[in-house]
Image (cartoon, rainbow, N blue to C red):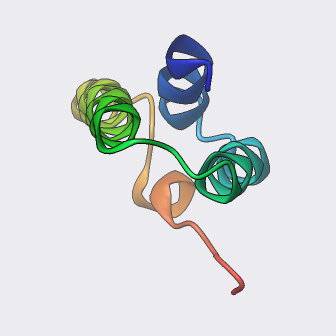
Amino acid sequence: MDLKALKQGIADLEEKKIMKMLSDFVTSNPTEEEGLKAIVACQEGMVTVGDLFEKGEYFVGDLSLRVNY
């Protein structure tokens, strides 16, 4: 898992890319440590999203993700 790419994908609101990365990651049977690192990368990406929202660069409509399971 490319954690930097995951973080950036979240920050860029690349829904399909993020979901593909996470789906592939889960099917790879990651270790607990790898899972925790992925969670941290997601959290860091969301911090960037929050910062961009506060600056008025993202709007509520931009932030609504539609996930089909």
Q: Residue furthest bottom?
A: 69
Q: Quadrant of residue 42?
A: top left
Q: Residue at x 47, y 56 (%)?
A: 63
| Camera-nearest residue between 6 and 24 | 24
Q: Residue at x 61, y 30 (%)?
A: 9
Q: Is 31 above or below relative to 5? A: below
In percent of width and height, residue 12 lies at: 59, 29
Q: In the shown orientation, is residue 38 left or right of residue 54?
A: right
Q: In the shown orientation, is residue 62 left or right of residue 42?
A: right
Q: In the shown orientation, is residue 39 left or right of residue 61?
A: left
| Camera-nearest residue between 17 and 24 | 24
In percent of width and height, residue 46 lies at: 32, 37
Q: In the shown orientation, is residue 50 left or right of residue 69?
A: left
| Camera-nearest residue between 50 and 22 | 22
Q: Residue furthest top?
A: 4
In percent of width and height, residue 44 lies at: 28, 26
Disc tally is 0
Quarter holding the C terminus is bottom right
In percent of width and height, residue 49 lies at: 36, 34
Quarter holding the N terminus is top right
Q: Is 1 above or below relative to 43? A: above
Q: Residue at x 63, y 46 (%)?
A: 25
Q: Is 59 above or below relative to 38? A: below
